[in-house]
Amino acid sequence: MERDDMQKRSLQALARELLERARGASGGRAAATVIGGHERVLRQTVIALVKGTALGDHENPGWASVHVLAGRVRLSTGEHS
């Protein structure tokens, strides 16, 4: 049984849409939460960054996973990169 707030979406299509928005944004990035949110334990967000853009340090209350749909990303934490 599918929950009412769950929708099927193409991640590739969403990534293309967000990349277009990121190209037009002054910060060079755009994002959309696809599952959960601040009030949920699980939150999954698709983020698009144009080449040369950085997403700075930020609080993360738990585990995180990164799936790169296109391009390359450098993830750094502490001394590890």
Image (tube, rainbow, N blue to C red):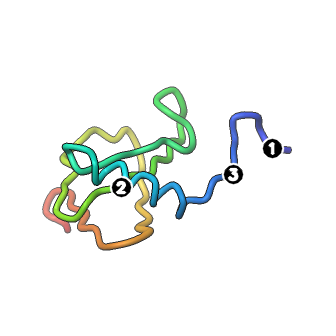
Q: Give the residue at mark 2.
A: 48
Extreme residue in the right direction: 1
Q: Residues within 10 Å of mark 3 (few under 14, many from 20)?
A: few
Quarter occupied by residue 34: top right
Depth order, front residue of 43/50: 50
Helix, strand, or loop for circle 3?
loop
Helix, strand, or loop for circle 1?
loop
**Circle on res. 2:** 1
Count all numbered tags in the image, as a single digit: 3
Q: Residues within 10 Å of mark 1 (few under 14, many from 20)?
A: few
Residue at image point 54% right, 42% down: 42
**Circle on res. 74:** none
**Circle on res. 8:** 3
Quarter occupied by residue 23: bottom left
The spot of residue 27 in percent (x, y) is: 20, 45
Residue at image point 37% right, 38% down: 61
Identity, as a three-letter code, of the amino acid under mark 1: Glu
Extreme residue in the top direction: 39
Q: Earlier in the sequence, mark 3 or mark 1?
A: 1
